[in-house]
Image (cartoon, rainbow, N blue to C red):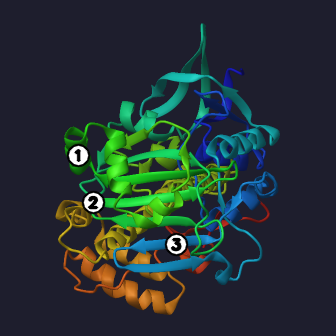
Amino acid sequence: MRDVTQVLVIGGGPAGSTAAGLLARQGVQVTLLEKDVFPRYHIGESILPSCRPIFELLGVWDKVESHGFQPKGGAYFSWGPDEWEVKFSELGDDGANAWQVVRADFDKILLDHSRELGVEVQEGVTVKEIEFTGDRPAAAQWTRGDDSGRLAFDYLIDASGRRGVMATKYLKARRFHNVFRNVATWSYWKNAKPLEKGPAGAITVASVPDGWFWSIPLHDGTTSVGLVTGRDTFNRKRAELGGIEEVYHAALAQCPIVADLLTDAERTTGMRTEQDYSYTSETFHGPGYLLCGDAACFLDPLLSTGVHLATYSAMLAAASIGSVLRGEVTEDEARAFFDGVYRGAYERLLVLVSVFYESYRGKEYHFYNAQRLSAEDRDQLNLQASFDRIITGIADLKDASDIYRRVRQHLGGEQSGDANPLANLNKEHELRATPISADRAVGGLYLVHEPQLGLRRA
């Protein structure tokens, strides 16, 4: 391993691989340190169409498309008494533009591609300490088995996932939300029946009184089936019923649409569980560093936004650092741009997911009431700025009119009294809020892809 690099990326998941690859394509010297050896397991299998243009920019889309993943034609929702489908083909795109992926395979494709682009990828390497010069990170002390060393760098991208090296260890800036204090528990099944409703290969999202299930068909013949429920409810029922598996199957008995898919299916794995996954860092940046993907924030799996936020923030980071290194913008300007755009995307989704939960018909269920943004959550947002970003980012006027009313009420903490579900909130790819032209500039800057990825002054 080299001793000095222009940019150090911590983490080889979608955020780290994408940021590293996009920087390497600009001729930047990048070293990526990943604590695991790929392939490795990871949850988060449902990919949104919003990732496609980023993967095309990275030059990896053809590899993803040719791997054989399950094409994702859209989504099917059974939400309270309402059912509806969203077909991605109706959005005007040709061919499949989203996939249900086995993350071990998918993440390895991205990591190997970054290596092919010139990134020095080091797997099985753990960053133990970050050295600082004042407030600026300057070097990383790393270990790999009995080996250890020091790597100096000019810029740092922390894409270390939920571990969040900078946010948790050094900045002490991670804050958990009052909303989405949920538990996800899931397993994998073989011989599950295909869903007869909805688009081919769709993710199924089906509500139950104390939460909801996802069902995701995968190309290896298995189906990912997970339950999301409130943390307090989960702990109470686990004590009452005797364990995690009992909680899972009791909820499954209340979800006919998913239970029917598993009539003749066989579980192939044990139960996996995660909690306390709804958080944000109070800062996404600082002198010489940017936080990407789950290292910065995560909200909720409801709308399958994890990989979207990871790759989106990675693209912003690569554009920002690349332009700084070329002398096109100052570091302060680039950091302000990165923070404004990334935080805007995150806040938009935070509000939309909470509004989606609030749309559930059945106000007597504690779970759905608990997903509303609290007064403290709302106070920590710049409500008018968040509201403006949401509304101006929605191209479809009908959607905008409905969401305008609902979000305004939600941000104000009001009960809307409207029982209609917001069927289109999962269409993150319809939210065109990215500053890609001078009239959408953030802090006087906007994103360009030609002649190479970077930032340009309005």
- Give the labeled residue for mark 2: 210
Inspect this view and state whether residue 171 appears: yes
For marks 1 and 3 on the same chain, the one whose residue lies earlier in the sequence: 3
- Give the quarter of the figure containing the C terminus: bottom right
> What amino acid is at disc 2?
Asp
Mark 2 lies on a secondary structure that is loop
The numbered mark at residue 148 is: none
Q: Position of residue 80 (x, y in %)?
A: 34, 74
- Residue 32 drawn at (x, y percent): 65, 33
Residue at 19 percent across and 42 percent down: it is: 240
Q: Nearer the viewer, mark 1 or mark 3?
A: 1
Most distant residue in the front direction: 264
Q: Which residue is mark 1?
A: 237
- Name the one closer to the observer, 138 or 107: 107
Q: CA distance from mark 2 to mark 1?
A: 11 Å
Left or right, 190 with respect to 179, comes to right
Horizontal side of 259 relative to 30 (left or right) equals left
Residues under numbered marks 2 and 1 in contact, where contact means CB atoms less than 8 Å apart: yes
Q: How many other residues sit within 10 Å of disc 2, few (<14), some (14-19) or many (≥20)? A: some
The three-letter amino acid code for the residue at tag 3 is Tyr
The type of residue carrying mark 1 is Lys
Task: Looking at the image, tell me whether mark 2 or mark 3 is earlier in sequence order.
Answer: 3
Of 245 and 383, the residue lying toward us:
245
User: What distance separates the C-alpha of mark 1 from that of mark 3?
Assistant: 28 Å
Q: Looking at the rendering, which quadrant does residue 109 occupy?
A: top right
- At label 1, counting other C-alpha atoms closer than 10 Å, the crowd grade (few under 14, some 14-19, many 20 or more) is some
Picture residue at 79% right of the left edge, 63% below the top: 451
Q: Are marks 1 and 3 in contact (CB under 8 Å)?
A: no
